[in-house]
Amino acid sequence: MSASPFSGDSLLPDDIVALAARVVAENIAVGRRVALAESCTGGLVAAALTEIAGSSSVLDCGFVTYSNEAKHEVLGVAMDIIDTFGAVSVATAWAMAQGALKHSGADVAVAISGIAGPDGGSAMKPVGTVVFARAVRGSDEINAEEKLLDGTSRATVRHQATLVALELLLP
């Protein structure tokens, strides 16, 4: 067996791991389970949580729904929403979060959809446009927003989006 190619105990950047540790600890403290519906982050938020010992007490499941068809088939996002507002829209993110709650045993779900680049952006939705939504079981409160993150690189967008999503998972 050869030595590990990683310098630390994690595959992920320290800031993501530190925030994920807070998410796990604080959700354990309040007895809350979470689910994720990820698109542009491709499972990075779920991966960050699973870097933390004890995450099985918090993470119920994660859905990586990259294509519009997956958003529709797996999470139940209506094609009318995607066709009308686009995959990168508050409406789609909200529907993704609702779908993640419906198809999980979680108390809270966070959804992320965006344009990580380097292609795919437009004047209306440039690279770095990412939408986030948080749905809480038993609540009608809508928590969804669009952010324009630093679109310098694909990695930068995905890193920032992961941090924002983890913040939304804090109780």
Image: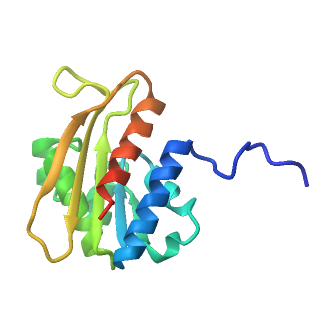
Choose top left, top right, bottom left or bottom right for residue 51.
bottom right
Q: Which colour scheme is used?
A: rainbow
Choose top left, top right, bottom left or bottom right for residue 154.
top left
Name the residue located 21 percent from the left edge and 69 percent from the top edge.
136
Choose top left, top right, bottom left or bottom right for residue 27.
bottom left
Name the residue located 25 percent from the left edge and 24 percent from the top edge.
126
Q: Residue 2: horizontal and vertical position, in percent?
A: 89, 49
Name the residue located 24 percent from the left edge and 58 percent from the top edge.
96
Q: Give the answer, above or below, for where 79 lies relative to 83.
A: below
Residue at the limit of the structure toward the right, as seen here: 1
Q: Give the answer, above or below, for where 158 lies relative to 4.
A: above
Q: Residue 14: horizontal and vertical position, in percent?
A: 56, 44
Quarter of the image for the C terminus: give it: bottom left
Q: Residue 161: horizontal and vertical position, in percent?
A: 36, 41
Q: Residue 21: horizontal and vertical position, in percent?
A: 49, 59
Quarter of the image for the N terminus: give it: bottom right
Can residue 82 be seen at all in this image of the molecule?
no
Can residue 81 be seen at all in this image of the molecule?
yes
